[in-house]
Every structure is written in C-alpha cells, then in structure tokens.
Image (cartoon, rainbow, N blue to C red):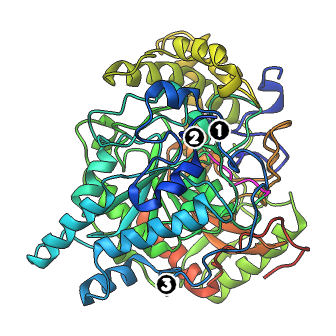
Amino acid sequence: MSDGGTGASRHSHEGGARPREARPPASSTCTRRRFLELGALAGAAAATGLGCSPDQAREASTMPNRDVPGAGSSPNPDPDFPLAEHSIAQLQAALESGEHTARSLAEAYLERAARVDAGGPAVNALIETNPDALAIADHLDEERRQGHLRGPLHGIPVVVKDNIDTADRMETTAGSLSLVGAPPVRDSTVVRRLREAGAVLLAKTNLSEWANFRSTRSSSGWSARGGQTRNPYALDRNPCGSSSGSGVAASADLCAGAIGTETDGSVVCPSTVNGIVGLKPTVGLVSRAGIVPISHTQDTAGPMCRTVADAATLLGALAGVDDSDPATCASTGRFSGDYRQFLQTDGLRGARLGVVRGYFGFHDGVDALMEDSLAALREAGAELVDPVELATREQFGEFEWQVLLYEFKADLNAYLAARPGVQYRTLAELIDFNRAHAAREMPHFGQEIFELSQEKGPLTEEEYVDAVEASQRLAGEEGIDAALGEHRLDALVAPTGGLAWLTDWINGDSGKGGCSGPAAAAGYPHLTVPAGFVSGLPVGLSFFGAAWSEPTLIRLAYAFEQTVQARRPPGFAATAGETRRG
C-alpha cells in the first residue's frame, strides 16, 4: 500500500496512512499441484480446490511453492505466448477477423496461467479459475455468429479480485478460510456489468487477506486461502496490495484486464510495482454493491490493465448509477459509457500540472526517473507548476485511520448479515475464528486491526462524525481542491510509490513512498501509469485531481504513456538486478 505521507518508511495498509505513533504495539488433496494435474482447462480452483468440501478447504495447509518468498523461481516458461501484451482492442480485432474466438482466447490465457501462475515462476496471482469460463465463451461466440455484439468487451477474458461477489461456482472469500464453502447468491454490480458487457470472467485473484485490513504487520499479497502472491519482475519481492493478484495477473499476461479494489492505495500501489496502469475512480462512480467492504467513505473498485486505453475500456463498462449503492447517485450526469473518447495523444498540450514535491525524496533512483518523467511532460506540451504544496498533506491521516476503524466493523457486519449461507456473521465472530484457526490464519502476523475496529462504537459517535468531516475536508477541499484552484491546475503529479520491497513475513511490509492518501481520503480519482524502471523494478507516475475528473486524468495519462512508452513485460527474475534505469 502507498502511504500518503511524506515518503518516510511508514508501514501502510489498505485502510490508508497512519502515523507510527497512532499504531498499536505490535497436506490436503486440495493443492495447486493437484490443479496442475487436472489441467488448467478443467477449471479447478487454485486455492480451495473445487470439489473439495468446505471442511477440507479450511483444513488445507499452505500450498507447495505458494508460501515461500522467492521459492520455485525459474525462467519464463512461456516466452512465445502468442497473445503477449495484446491490448483489448487487438484482441477484439482478432475476434472480429475470425483469427480467434472467445473460447480460444480463454483457453490461451488458462494455459498461460497453468504455465506461469501455477507452474514455472509460480507467481500465484489467481486464487481460483472459473469452471464455467469456456461455456461462457462458447455462448458469447454464438452471439457473435448471430450478429449480436455487446461492445468492446465482448469475448474478452478478465479477472476480478476475490473480495468481489460472483454468483457462480467460484468462491468469494476476501482470502479468508472463514468464508469458504458459502458462495454468494448474487453477483456484485461490478460483475453483473462485466457479464452484461460480454466479458469472460476467467478467474478470481489472490489478495492481501481482508484487503490488508487485519494486521499492522502484514505481508501484502498473502492470504490464508491463497498464500503469497509474488512480483513477476523479481520473485522475491512483494507485489504490494491489497489488489496483489489483479496487478500481477495483468502484468504477467494472465488476462486482458483485471479489476481491483482500493480504500487507500490498493489499486495504485500494486499497479506501480507491477508495471501496469491502475485507475482508482471517484467514490460513487463505480458501484460497491456486493464487494466485501472496509469503508463506505473510501471504497471503490477500479481497472488494472497494461495500457491506459484498456483501463478506459473497462471503466466504461463499470461506471454508472446503481440503486444498490446510494453513493452512485452522485455520478448522475457525470459518468461516461465510453471513456475511450478521452484518449488523446496530444492530451498534454496546454495542460497545467502541479508537481507535489512533498512526495519525492525517498529514493534517489525514483527521483531521477521522475525528473525524466517531468521532462517528458514538458516536451509533450504540459506547463508544470513546480513545486506545488498540499498544505494538509500530513494532517488528515489520523482522522482517516479513525474513519476506517469505525466503518470497517459497521460495514463488514452489514455485508455478512446480508450474505446468505456464511457461518460467521460479525467481526467479533471472525476474530474468534482466526484465534481458533491461528495456525492457518495467523502463521505470520496477527489481527490487531480487527481488534481495534471491534472496540469502536456505532457510527453515531462524535469521534467518528468529526473524523469523517475532518478527513474529507483536509484531503479534499483544503487539500487537492485548494491546490488545483490556487494554481489553476488540471491535475497533480507525483511518484506513485517506491520500489517493490523484499517479501518479509517476520517484519511485514517495508515499502517507502506513496501519494495515494489525499485522493483516497477525499474520494477523488487517481491514475498511475508506468514511467520506467529502477534496478529493474517498475515505477509509476501518478495523476490525481478533483472529483469526477476521470476524463481529464485519462487524457493526460494516455498522452504521457504514448510519449514515454515505458511499459515492459516482466521477466520473472529470481531477484532484482544491479541498479540501472531504463
């Protein structure tokens, strides 16, 4: 997770930045090998093993090569993958020409997953594949033959994070063994809209368990159900989180595009360290109905893709008003059904961008790369106001933290109460479950955040009401909005975050840097795009701005992307190479 602070080495989670002083003290048959034996096309669940009983799944220990940082490293076993780096538009062209069918695309990505995700480098991005993926693809191929096309996602394989409800034969567990065996009975709105748009739901992705809101000493990308996801650029390094599997799946060509979720940093951080584009929308642009929550104030789903164009394509399918999520009412008249119209190669010409220097300074190599990025922005026609200060940058974090602690208990209890079939219906019961199953649920870190949240009272308490007001005002009106208005800016730019850190189950995450906090606390949009590499590890440049400014951010980021063309596919190295840039 990015930390939203000064770039100091703060340990931050999905729930956002919090100052150090605010923190409390600190072999089953259902295995991934069995998945390989059955073959990817069988649609077996990578983590729980479809066909296993819920009890077997809960008793399953960590899987071979899934829970050892850096273990199982090997050269890319699939260097000639024919769909490598293909955009959604390229895949759609192949479908239209007859070169491919929806089924052949799904088969190709499933085979890729067997070689790269479950086998070979074993990046462990997918927690479960969809046993119905090929049947869905066949149905969409038949629709195409009959002349019925649903849009740019018709027949396109996508993956979604395992905290997003799917009413099918896959689970939705937020990475926890406590929810195994009771799949949702209704699709989330995000999944329903993807299906309506013609996407082939290929798999669910691993994540930091409970979206990284369980422990102050967690390892991003680890869940009891899914094990440890690994960074495809250096397998001993962390993929960030909590949308770890979505970031790695998109980067490693396991899908055409992925959906993640963010409360603070969980789309943009795994996007920057995995070398992809991540777009965290304005809260209310995309429905949260049917998504395991942390905070109704800050939660949102968003696209994670290899290109800005692909992210824009997915966003168009997701955005819009949903009666099941009252927050989306604010998007009326403010969303687009097709964000591709904002893809302009000259989109930086005449733009005024503010450089938030307060988010620089945590790594010399990142700073040097950012200077190159700023030069590229100028060359593409942007006017830079440098520096721009967010006066409240260090003031809202503690308020945000209190908001998340309060809302997590209230929102999670409401979600669990409304989901039929689950055995554990309150945060208190989940805490007891984790204690009773500590060997599997808490082998590396505890549940301090769970316990802090459980101690909070109702959302009518004055502390909560005041914290919500202060967090949103300081990050939004007196933060981002004030900076934009004072300097007449289109957007703000900063390094998205630091380099991927070594995965460490003893000490937890150790990432440095990050600018996710203001947009997260304010509920504003944030888009990161690959800017280059330091020591062989990707770094992204962030564009963030006012509420509902997705069209502007897409325009700016697309022009930057086309100028620098920094995206490079991962090489699945065992460890990062010698320091170098480029």
The location of residue 518, given as percent across then percent down, is 62, 47
User: Three-letter amino acid code at disc 1?
Assistant: Gly
Within-10-Å neighbours for mark 1: few <14, some 14–19, many 20+: many
Q: Which residues are magenta?
A: 236-241
Q: State the mark number for residue 442.
A: none
Image quadrant of residue 475? top right
**Of residues 45 and 25, which is closer to you in this image?**
45
Within-10-Å neighbours for mark 2: few <14, some 14–19, many 20+: many
First of labels 1, 2 by sequence position: 1
- Cβ–Cβ under 8 Å for marks 3 and 1: no
Q: State the mark number for residue 82.
A: 3
The residue tagged 1 is 16
- Cβ–Cβ under 8 Å for marks 1 and 2: yes
First of labels 2, 3 by sequence position: 3
User: Three-letter amino acid code at disc 3?
Assistant: Pro
The location of residue 200, given as percent across then percent down, is 32, 62
Q: Report whether 482 appears left or right of 95.
A: right
**Residue 109 visible at all:** yes
**Of residues 74 and 9, which is closer to you in this image?**
74
Q: State the mark number for residue 521.
A: 2
